[in-house]
Amino acid sequence: MNNIIRIWFGIFFSLAMALSGHAQNNSTSGLSAATKRLRAHDSRNELYTRFRYQPVKGLGYEKGVSRRDPSSIIKVGELYYVWYTRCLDKKFTWLNADIWYASSPDGMNWTEKGPAVKRGPKGSWDDYSVFTCNILVADRNYYLCYQAETKTNDAETKTGLGINVVGMAKADSPDGPWTKLQKPILKTAPDGKFECPDHSRPWHRIITEQGSWDSAAVHDPGIIPRWGKYWLYYKGHGLDDLIFADSRWGVAVADRPEGPYLKSPLNPVTNSGHEVWVWPWKKGIAAMVDWAGPEKGTVQYTEDGVNFVVKSALEDIPPAGGAYIADKFTDPTDGQGFTWGLAHHGRTDWTFLVRFECDLHRDSKKQLAWKHFPHYSTIRDVMRDPGRFNVPRDALLEKRR
Ligand code: AAL
């Protein structure tokens, strides 16, 4: 009899414990959603950093020339190399442009060497602009992938202003000469249709079918070799969605550097991010998801190339950063990250390149000092125009940013 009572008591006790545990998980004890999602201190988070900036020689501010959207930086022999958009047109500093390159012995003093890839002849798919490029080193060759645009507005082939495709050029030396592939390696989604009733007004389009998320533009290409394949990350825009604040990224994968690149059925693989910037990190790929979209300002990580999770949130991310990532093209089993690169500043009459430093290398010591965190308690509009807020200019504790 005693035994039976004991058994019943045991069952009752376990049930009560299980039920109270369930209630606790759903109420106020246990782990909060935020703690479950991401338990990391910035000071110890390998994917957290603050950015420091300094001017460079040779690619800095220059009246009459815009330089923007630097590629990843590579080192060949004793020299670092970078490619970028060079534009003499003040209106849109990426259109009416070509791709140039520069080299440097130390990443600070750059020598502009000349054009690498120029626009195609009138009538070709890249006759208006070639721009926003990135470099890939594979099979002892160099590949530049870049955005391309033609002025010819054609509803049939879906080309024209603002409609971007991705082109590629190949060379056996970083100094060229570059041979362009005949056709784009990545195009906009075939859906999404428009009519151009008046060819003298090329921006005037009537959208007749909205199309998918990348039906208007595939741009900001960046290729990373990973797990034996080539992963081309790109930013996409739909025809109805040429709004900068809303961009997302997709990925297209190939067995060889020149393609064919097959878009992932999971695209878009991010819900945010303006300029694509990826690097091999540990076993996977890390992504700097910069300023556009609901997960702007984050570093994200994936171990399968398509399912990204947020690992940190950053401020003051280098615009269109191109980093020197020593192991970017080696498909490493344990990616190490980077500590410096170039970025552009675009809020001046002519866009120019600056150098940034950061602590995103596995060996980096985090620089957490106050002076590296200048955005605490600041409002950019006040910094820019203190007079409007009745603040004397000399009252600002820090220089204008
Ligand atoms: C940049 C990049 C692409 C866009 C334009 C020039 O910031 O995202 O290159 O097309 O703006």
Image (cartoon, rainbow, N blue to C red):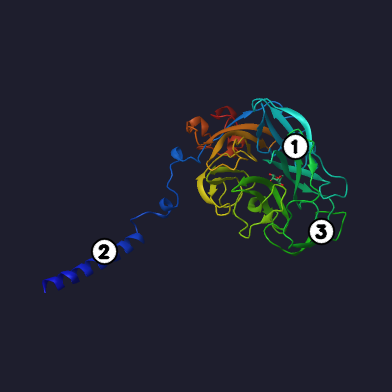
Which residue position holds label 3? 157
Q: Residues within 10 Å of mark 1 (few under 14, many from 20)?
A: some
Q: Earlier in the sequence, mark 1 or mark 3?
A: 3
Q: Report whether residue 64 is seen.
A: no
- Specify the quadrant that holds the C terminus: top right
Image quadrant of ligand 1 equals top right
Which residue position holds label 2? 17
Observer-side mark, 1 or 3, equals: 1
Q: Between marks 2 and 1, how big is the CA–CA gap?
A: 69 Å
Q: Residue furthest front?
A: 139
Q: Is residue 264 above or below residue 87?
A: below
Q: Residue at x 51, y 30 (%)?
A: 371
Say which element carries label 1. loop
Q: Is residue 128 above or below residue 372?
A: below
Say which element carries label 2. helix
- Which percent across, then down, holds residue 298? 54, 46
- Which percent across, then down, holds residue 14? 24, 66
Q: Amino acid at mark 3?
A: Thr
Observer-side mark, 2 or 1, equals: 1
Q: Between marks 1 and 3, how big is the CA–CA gap?
A: 33 Å
- Asked if the residue at tag 3 contacts the one at tag 1, i.e. Cβ–Cβ closer than 8 Å, the answer is no
Q: Earlier in the sequence, mark 2 or mark 1?
A: 2
Which residue position holds label 1? 172
- Which percent across, then down, holds residue 264? 64, 57
Q: Report whether residue 79 is seen.
A: yes
- Specify the quadrant that holds the N terminus: bottom left
